[in-house]
Amino acid sequence: GAVVSQHPSRVICKSGTSVKIECRSLDFQATTMFWYRQFPKQSLMLMATSNEGSKATYEQGVEKDKFLINHASLTLSTLTVTSAHPEDSSFYICSATLAGGNTGELFFGEGSRLTVL
Amino acid sequence: QKEVEQDPGPLSVPEGAIVSLNCTYSNSAFQYFMWYRQYSRKGPELLMYTYSSGNKEDGRFTAQVDKSSKYISLFIRDSQPSDSATYLCAMRHNYGQNFVFGPGTRLSVLP
């Protein structure tokens, strides 16, 4: 299957700082990437859909100025949590679909655990 | 009614048992159906992918889709302790990019 790499896998930061998480499709081109947030023992919550070369589409209730998403190329999307606070501590996961494909397959990164002190 | 419903469990079975995991959905437009396995603190891993109705088998895993009943299943034969994880069903329309996930079922296979 296609490989999606996410970095860093774990980050601890102080309140008020910004944190950037990268999501890369290693062996395929991804027109669309998705960013999810997951709380312990809960399912995935879609935050935004990121399309290469255009602005991300945010889900209702997700602050776009808080969670900045950039999808500058077909293999890289970034999520920046700006002015992080303890309530932003969570597990963030990206996923990607194959460019030009309509097979329905969605491939996930390994996730990034953010802890804001 | 939620778009995709899934019993959260936890489901505990002895090693070697046949496990049946299920999801129901309300939107008849869904055409692509997937099952993911997620270990604790890891990203979901695609297990099975099915288009429209029918069965698909891969090793110990069998996925079934019954679109008339809006019901999908994942069967795990000869379950192993390493199968202990959360299993998420997911589905999408035949158009657009909307993936919808079930809440996941936590499975424990006891040695």
Image: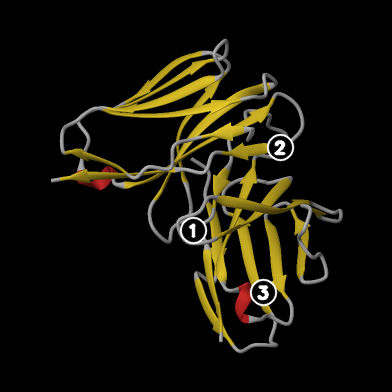
The x, y position of residue A78, in whole percent, is 70, 65
Of badges 1 and 2, the one in the foreground is: 2
Residues at circles 1 and 2 in contact by the CB criterion of under 8 Å: no
Disc 2 residue type?
Asn
Q: What residue type is labelled 1?
A: Glu
- The residue where tag 3 is placed is A20
Secondary structure under tag 1 reads loop
Is B101 located above or below residue A23 in the figure? above
Marks 2/3 same chain = no
Question: In the rendered structure, the residue with mark 1 lies on which chain?
Answer: A
Looking at the rendered structure, whether the residues under marks 1 and 3 are on a common chain is answered as yes
Mark 3 nearby-residue class (10 Å; few <14, some 14–19, many ≥20): some
Which residue shows up at 81% across the image and 64% down it? A64
The residue under the point 57% across, 53% down is: A26
- In percent of width and height, residue B15 lies at 16, 38
Residue linked to disc 2: B98
